[in-house]
Every structure is written in C-alpha cells, then in structure tokens.
Amino acid sequence: MFGSSPPDDGPRGDGPRGRRSTPGGFAAPTPVPTRDRERPVRRRAGSATEPPPIPAPAPAPDVTTDGPPVPYIPVRRLLSLTVAGFAALLTVGLIMGAQTSGVAHRLPYAIVVLGAQVLYVLATTMAIRPPAGKIVAAVGILSALAADYAANSPHEATIGPLGLVAGAGLVLGVIGQLAMREGRARVTESLGATTIIVVGVVAFATLLVLVRIPLGTQAITVCLASCGVALTIARLTDVFVPYPRLAAQVPRGAAGVVLGTMIGTAVAAYMGRYLVFFTPQSAALVGAAAAVAAILADLTIGFAEAGRELEGDAPTMWLARHMQGPLAGFALAAPVAYLITNLLWKASA
C-alpha cells in the first residue's frame, strides 16, 4: 500500500546524488566554481591570438643635466680704463694725421694708417690664433702695403683698386694656407681668419681715399671723433656702471653702449656747426652711423672672444684681445664714413 523506498539516484528521483534532473529527464550540468571561471586562460607563446607586447614608455629626458653653468665674468675696471685710453689715443692720432695731410704730403698720414693696420693684424692674429698664423699675418701686412699704395696711386680718388687688393689678398692667403699641412687640415678656419684680417686692413685704407676728396678731411674728423668718443665713453661707463650686463660671459654693460652712441652722435652734431661742408644735421647723421658701426664691431669682438673661451680655447695675451675691439671699430667705421660722405657730396653737387 505504501510506495517503495526512494531510488538510489537521490531523493525525489532527481537522478544521481547531488544532481537535479530537468523536466526533459536530462541531468543539469554542475556549475563551475567561481575561482575556476576567473582564472585567466594561458596561451602559448607565438600564438596567433596573442596580443602584441606593449613597449615600456621611454624615460623622460633629464633637463637638469644640460651642461656646466655659464661662467659669470666680472668687469675689470682697470682694464676697461686702459682700453678707453687706447681708443682715445687712436682717435687723436688718426684725426691729427688727417689734418696734416695735403695734396703733396700724403706720406705722413699713410704711415699713421699703416701703423694702425699693423696693430690690427698683430692683435687679430694673436686673438684668433689661426692655423699657420705667421702666413696669415704676413698676408695681412702685404695686403696693408698694397692697399695703401692703391689708395694713393690713382689720379681719381676711388675705392675700386682696394677691392682688387682685397681679392688678391684672399687668394694669396688661401694659397699660403694650402701649402701648409696645418692649414689644409683646418682650411675653413684659416680662410675665415684671412678674410677678417685682409678686409680689416683694406677698410683702414679707405681713410687714405677719403682724405683725397674735398669733403674727406672734414668727414674723417667728424666720423673718427664720433667713433672715438663712443668707444671711450662706453668703456669709461663700464668702469663705474657696468649694468645691465649684456651677457654673463661678456664683461660689458648696456648702459655704456647706449650712452657712448648718444654722446658720440652729439659730439658730431656739435662739430658740424663749425665745419664748412657740414650742418649739425648732416654731421649727426654721419657721426651716428660711424659710432654705431664702431660700437657693434667692438661688441662683436667681445662676444667672439667669450665664445672661444667657452669652447675651451686657452685665452690669448690680454693686450691683443682688448686692443682688437677698438681697432675693429675704427676699421668698420672708415668705409661707412666714406659711403655716407659720397652720398652727401653727390647730393650737394
């Protein structure tokens, strides 16, 4: 009357013990444990389904190790005073030589200009120290002699022969450098030094051409006075107020540069009141151009010397280094004065 005992498949006839049957009579799958489902599937290396490896990010560059700090060079006041005195003496010598020059007495001024050219060659050669420096210095002195002769020999005052002298000097310098082993190894540096020296001495010879034209002697007086005053005041200002500094490695102040240019232009304008062929306006124009050219040349020499020292070159003799700036200033001011004077002369004719 009573039913039979439960089957072995489990209570209620659900199939094997621990498994529950479905309405269709099939046993339900045993659920997989959670920890087995969360276990990552391992793939063999080199499998087609394996994602490419992600490269590690490159480390950020260290911006704190750019190199050694730029050295701060203090202004040596006694040296600035010495350079200012040299610029003033050079101004007086070149102006007084021009005043004593005449139609039949050009030799004294040619000797004065030649002395300035020799100083420029020696100072620049010792400061730059090019390969085969003796050849560069010899080419510079020969170019100075040839330029002075070419400035005085033609019947008409012109700078055309000076261009030929400059070209011949460069060719002679290249030949001399290629003849030396050291010059062949550093031909670019040799050519650059030869160009600076030859162009500088030829620029000085422009004063000998300028003194031969009617407006020339007065133009030399105005230009060289403005140039010399600008250089002298700039150096004297560095003795007392060498601020603000133009660069940490260049011991020059911006106050001296601005003040020297302004006073040099004012001196030229004042001299124009007492000269026949000039007015204060025209003299100020010529003087300002000469003063700016001289100041820029002087600053360029200072920055070039600082660059050589930062590259590790040993400093040269201090006298040559600091004479080079004023000499380069006068060398650049001479052709500027010639060009502006020619323009003024043609405008007034």
Image (cartoon, rainbow, N blue to C red):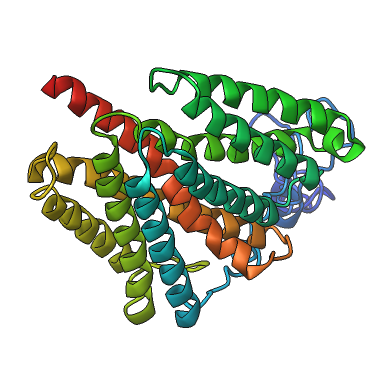
Q: Nearer the viewer, residue 76 or 340?
A: 340
Quadrant of the rendered image containing residue 13 = top right
Q: Nearer the viewer, residue 140 or 80?
A: 140
Q: Position of residue 74 (x, y in %)?
A: 50, 78
Q: Is residue 54 visible?
A: no
- Would residue 187 be seen by someone viewing this image from the given angle? yes
Residue at the limit of the structure toward the front, as seen here: 104
Residue in the picture at 28% in, 67% down: 255
Left or right: where 131 falls relative to 162 = right
Q: Nearer the viewer, residue 298 or 122?
A: 122
Corner quadrant of residue 308:
bottom right
Residue at the (45%, 45%) spot, across then down: 109
Is 276 placed above or below 269 here? above
Identify which residue is drawn at 36% across, 33% down: 103
Q: Position of residue 198 (x, y in %)?
A: 60, 35
Q: Quadrant of the C terminus?
A: top left
Q: Where residue 5 sits in the image (x, y, percent)?
A: 79, 53
| Left or right position of 240 against 150 | left
317 relative to 202, above or below: below
Measured as percent of width and height from the top left, residue 275 is found at 13, 45
